[in-house]
Image: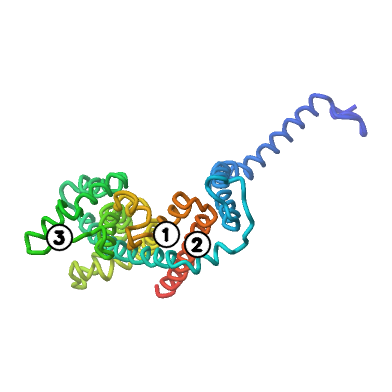
Amino acid sequence: MSQGGAPGTAPPPAKRAREDRQGLRNLLHRLDLRGAPYAFVAPFFVVFAAFSFYPLVYTAWISLHHVELSSLNLMEWVGFDNYTALWNDDRFWNALANTFTIGVISTVPQLLMALGLAHLLNYRMRGSTFFRVASLTPYATSVGAAALVFTMLFERDFGMINWMLSLVGVDHIDFENNKWAAQIAISTIVIWRWTGYNALLYLAAMQAVPRDRYEAAAIDGASRWQQFLKVTVPGIRATIVFTIVLSTIGATQLFGEPLIFGQGPNGITGGADNQYQTLGLLLYEEGWKNYQMGRAATVAWAMFLLLILVFVVQRVLKRALARRS
């Protein structure tokens, strides 16, 4: 009789056990190869589903109901009435316009200053690490502390800004009650907080540009300014588009700066005449001042749709830039 046994007989128990263990190891190996990536990313999707996707869907459901903050368990179906009312609400269009103007006033100077600051930090100089860390300090400062300090600086009677303006013969400006002055003051807070952050993004992108491009441009006789325009800016074009989109999203969600700038009840309404009320403040006013959670959810979804529009515009710009390059 052979070692494997006669034909048709069962294999010995020891051999069958080895085959079972080998089959189990093969199965675990296949699961490790195919399932490990999903296991690693699963925590993110669990957290995303619990704290992002579910609130988003639930907010959409609430926006189709009449719901008050004092009785969240009582929901009256109204369909798209909240969206119709929001479309016909002058406060919404005023908040949308204020969000747009504050976003433009804060984003354009912010990114230009960040680009120039990153260009300077890109040079080899003493204490470069200190200046890079210092440029990030405003971003690390809480929005409450920053807004409170700038509110005191822009105060009408005793603020430092008006004191400096009085030295050159300019009368005191009521920054809070003047529409454009208030929006410029709020934009100043945003610029101060985010310029350094964007500068470091630009700096990281600049350091990834090959040095031989600058050497070739220098050999061709290009000045530092021409190298910046012809080499640096095209080399970090994707990062510039990214920061524009990021700043636009931040401007759409602007809330803390105008709220604290109002110094009281006027902060929620964006001033006595809603002169600097943003979409974030309108959402807060509807939900936590007027107790209308359905309307607040409608404003939230309007903001979400605006962000989707920004994403679509970003994709179009990215494809257009890719075709040009």
Residue with the mark numbered 1: 279
Look at label 3 and name its amino acid: His
On the image, the x and y values in percent for residue 22 come to: 72, 33
Foreground: 23 or 271?
A: 271
- Which colour assignment does the render follow? rainbow
Image quarter (top left, top right, bottom left or bottom right) of the C terminus: bottom left
Q: Label 2's element?
A: helix
**Three-letter residue code for mark 1:** Leu
Mark 2 surroundings within 10 Å by alpha-carbon count, few (fewer than 14), some (14 through 19), many (20 or more) = some
Name the kind of residue labelled 2 in the image.
Answer: Ala
The quarter of the picture where residue 225 lies is bottom left
Q: Residue at left 18%, top 61%?
A: 173
Tell me the distance, in whole angstroms, between the alpha carbons under discs 1 and 3.
29 Å
Which residue is more in the foreground, 104 or 215? 104
* In the displayed structure image, the side of residue 115 where residue 307 appears, left or right: right
Dot 3 or dot 2: first in sequence order is 3
Residue nearest the observer in this picture, 86 or 243:
86
Tell me the distance, in whole angstroms, between the alpha carbons under discs 1 and 2.
9 Å
Q: Tell me which label, 1 or 2, sits earlier in the chain.
A: 1
Query: Dot 1, crowdedness within 10 Å: few (<14), some or many (≥20)?
Result: many
Residue at image location 27% in from the left, 54% down from the top = 189
